C-alpha cells in the first residue's frame, strides 16, 4: 500500500475517536468527552481530583491485601510460567534450604539466581523483606525504595589516587 494511502487511513482512524477539544481549567483525564464532562462536573461541585476521577471512570480504588496478592495462582506456585524440569529443581533447592513451600509461590523477579530459595513468598511482607535485605527497589503491590549502592573502599582510594 502506498505511503499516502496509509497516512490517510491512519488520519481517518484517529478522527473516528471522539476528542476533547475545549479548553478547561481542570486537567484532562480522558479523551472520551463523556468521562471528561463527568470529571469536570464533579470538580465544579467541589470534589477533589481523586474522587472526581473515580466517579467519572466509575471505578473505585483497588484494595491490595495479602489475600488478593496471592489470588489467581491456584495450586501452581509458579503461576504456570516455569517448565516442569525447572520446577523440580527449584523445589529441591528450596527443600535443601529448609524452606516450606506450602502456601507459597515462587516469584522469579525476586530471585538472585534461578531457583533462589528466598524467592518463595507467601505475603507482601515477605516480598518487602527480600527487597529490603537485598537493597532492591520494587513498585506495584509492594513499594520499596532501592538502597543506593555503597562504593567499596578500594574504589574510593582508586578515585582519590587518580586525581
Image: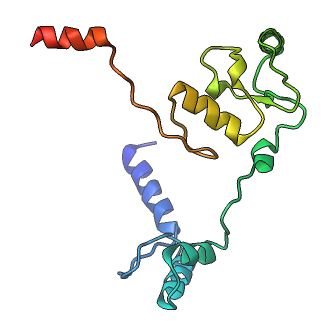
**Would you say 67 lies left or right of 30 here?**
right
What x and y, as percent, mark residue 115?
71, 14
Q: Is residue 57 left or right of residue 29?
A: right
Q: Quadrant of residue 111?
A: top right
Judged from this view, the residue extending furthest toward the front is 153
Q: Nearer the viewer, residue 5 or 96?
A: 96
The residue positioned 68% from the left and 40% from the top of the image is: 125
Residue furthest to the bottom in view is 45
The percent position of residue 98, horizontal first and vertical second, equals 81, 15
Q: Which part of the image, by quadrant, shows the C terminus?
A: top left
Comparing 57 with 104, the one in front is 104
Quadrant in the picture for residue 130: top right
Residue 62, placed above or below residue 26: above
User: 97 above or below 35?
Assistant: above
Q: Residue at the spot x=67%, y=73% of the render?
A: 58
Q: How is the image coloured?
A: rainbow
Amino acid at each position: 500500500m502506498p505511503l499516502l494511502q496509509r497516512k490517510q487511513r491512519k488520519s481517518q482512524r484517529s478522527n473516528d475517536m471522539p476528542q476533547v477539544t475545549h479548553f478547561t481549567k481542570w486537567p484532562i483525564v480522558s479523551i472520551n468527552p463523556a468521562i471528561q464532562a463527568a470529571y469536570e462536573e464533579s470538580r465544579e461541585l467541589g470534589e477533589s481530583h481523586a474522587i472526581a476521577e473515580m466517579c467519572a471512570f466509575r471505578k473505585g480504588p483497588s484494595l491490595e491485601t495479602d489475600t488478593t496478592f496471592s489470588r489467581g495462582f491456584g495450586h501452581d506456585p509458579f503461576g504456570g510460567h516455569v517448565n516442569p524440569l525447572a520446577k523440580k529443581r527449584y523445589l529441591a533447592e528450596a527443600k535443601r534450604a529448609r524452606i516450606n513451600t506450602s502456601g507459597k509461590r515462587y516469584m522469579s523477579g525476586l530471585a538472585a539466581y534461578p531457583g533462589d530459595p528466598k524467592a518463595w513468598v507467601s505475603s507482601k511482607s515477605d516480598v518487602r523483606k527480600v527487597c529490603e535485605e537485598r537493597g532492591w527497589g520494587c513498585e506495584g503491590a509492594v513499594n520499596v525504595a532501592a538502597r543506593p549502592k555503597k562504593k567499596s573502599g578500594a574504589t574510593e582510594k582508586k578515585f582519590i589516587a587518580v586525581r
